[in-house]
Image (cartoon, rainbow, N blue to C red):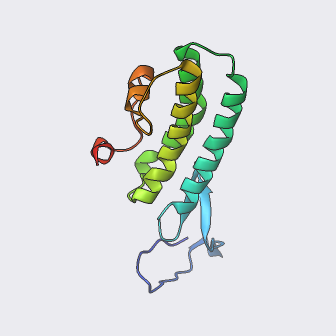
Amino acid sequence: MSFYRTRDRFDYSYSINANPLKRSEYKFLDLGITFDRELNFHSHLDNICCKALKMLGFIKRICNEFKLTSPIKTLYCAYVRFILEYGAVVWDPSTSCGKDQIERVQRKFLNYAAFILSIDHPPHDYIPILNKLGLSSLVIEEQLQT
């Protein structure tokens, strides 16, 4: 696969020992990160958010009777947040749409944790819940204040 940001494609035939390599047309998975030709990572964000939401649903089903902060936070960090943070150095979302997509998964967990643990907070203000659980936001702090 050749990566480019211009509209003009430069197709080069790569080979090893005179054997041409098969070209991937649109995207491929490498070490759990989905790469596409434009390096925009939209499909990767869709994949990890879908996977994280499925795992969050599983955690919500098994944690209905939990009343302690520690087990719920541990399960979330081990099985959901890990998915959202894996490889972030490579694919870190630069668009607000990508950041919102990832933060939406964490907000779903925070709403659930606030309900189960009876954490009082103003509507749509997740900072008290983050502080109570000892977690940090997945987005940059500047974006939280705007």
Asked if residue 91 shows in the view, the reply is: no
Left or right? Give the position of 109 relative to 140: right
Residue 107, image x and y in percent?
A: 50, 39
Q: Residue at x 28, y 43 (%)?
A: 145
Q: Position of residue 21 (x, y in %)?
A: 63, 71
Front residue of 75 and 115: 115
Quadrant where the image shows the N terminus: bottom right
In the image, residue 122 above or below residue 49: above
Please name whichever residue, 107 or 140, is drawn nearer the observer in this view of the structure.
Answer: 107
Q: Residue furthest bottom?
A: 8
Measured as percent of width and height from the top left, residue 81 is found at 53, 35
Question: How many badges with numbers are in the image?
Answer: 0
The residue located at (68%, 36%) in the rendering is 57
Relative to residue 10, is residue 51 drawn left or right? right
Which residue is more in the foreground, 57 or 10? Answer: 57
Please tell me in which quadrant of the rendered image residue 34 appears: bottom right
User: Nearest the camera: 54 or 125?
Assistant: 125
Picture residue at 58% right of the left edge, 61% below the top: 43
Q: Does residue 12 appear in this view?
A: yes
Q: Is residue 111 above or below residue 90?
A: above
Write the residue at 47% across / 83% down.
10
Q: Is residue 59 above or below residue 3?
A: above
Residue 95 on image: x %, y %: 40, 60
